[in-house]
Image (spheres, coloured by chain):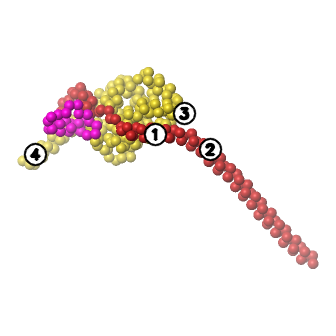
Amino acid sequence: MKEPAMDEMSLAQRAGSDPEAFGELYERHVRKIYNYIYYRTGNVHDAEDLTEMVFQRALRHVAKFEDKGVPFTAWLYRIAHNLVANWHRDRSRRPIVPLDQHVAVSEVSKHPESEAMALEETELLMTIVRQLPSDRQQLLILKFVERMSNAEIGEVMGRSEGAVKSLYHRTLNALRAEAKRLEEESSASKSLKDEKVG
Amino acid sequence: MDTSLSEKQLEELLSDILVPVDPSVQFIQRLRAQLVTYHGRDPLSIWMVIVVIATVFLLAVTSIGLVIRIFLGWVSLVGIISNRRRMKSETRVAT
């Protein structure tokens, strides 16, 4: 990330007056930003709208962008993060991710039952992920979707590598705890139903 | 879901779920085109703002001059009329 970051800095400094430089930055980052927003909003329509807003805002302010040791990517992610936060604030409910649109099934199962169970697990985990605080969601997206290292995530989130590592472990623990709680809740309600039927 | 998942198993599950998504090519191209248009329009809009401000300023100055002229004309007209009235009344008194 270090070498392109240097190159990116010069592109970012030219981007205010040079459309080609901004176009190059756009090509490099549009997919990352789209992915980030897509996983934060859960639908293509809002992901497209917000990605558009991110780049329009970036274009308006790129001339004021200064090299303060923060990479251009981090600057873009912060714009995206703020816009997503506003988007969530404007909505009282959180939409459910249309999993069938993006979930990668590595091995196509020949058994529909196990496939259905896998989908259920995926849905449950995705629901839990979406209930996490925004910084934890951001961390998971950067780590798993963008495959960033802890140091790179730290640059984007404005935290140290150690802090990212610690947040990551706390996030995994929270996911496991929440999964356990939901599992217990569902088994309790299931046994209650069985008792009523019996 | 198996709640006794180890950290590694949970990570594997997350890797399967959180995968990169490709935006549509049309969207990427449309947004790029929009941004280029926006980029081209930006300096023009600054000049437009300057031109609008200058025009408003000139119109304001011109209209102030006109208002002052009308006011002075009205004052002088009132002065002429009152002067004539005064002269008429003086002539009556004299006769």
Magenta region: A100-125
Cα distance between the residues tagged 2 and 1? 27 Å
Which chain is home to disc 3?
A: A
* Residue located beneath label 2 in the image: B50
Which amino acid lies under the numbered mark 1 shown in the image of this protein? Ala
- Between disc 2 and disc 4, the foreground one is 2
**What is the distance, in whole Å, between disc 3 and disc 4 at their CAs?**
69 Å
Q: Is residue A178 something that shows in the picture?
A: no
Residues packed near mark 1 inside 10 Å, few (<14), some (14 to 19) or many (20 plus):
few
Where residue A135 sits in the image (x, y, percent)? 36, 34
Decide: marks 2, 4 in contact (CB < 8 A)?
Answer: no
Q: Colour of chain A?
A: yellow
The residue under label 3 is A17
Residue located beneath label 1 in the image: B33
Q: Nearer the viewer, residue A44 or A179?
A: A44
Residue A81 versus residue A3 in the image, above or below = below
Three-letter amino acid code of the residue under disc 4: Asp
Q: Chain of mark 1?
A: B
Q: Are marks 1 and 4 in contact (CB under 8 Å)?
A: no
Residue A166 among those drawn in magenta: no
Q: Which mark is residue A194?
A: 4
Disc 2/disc 4 C-alpha distance (Å):
76 Å
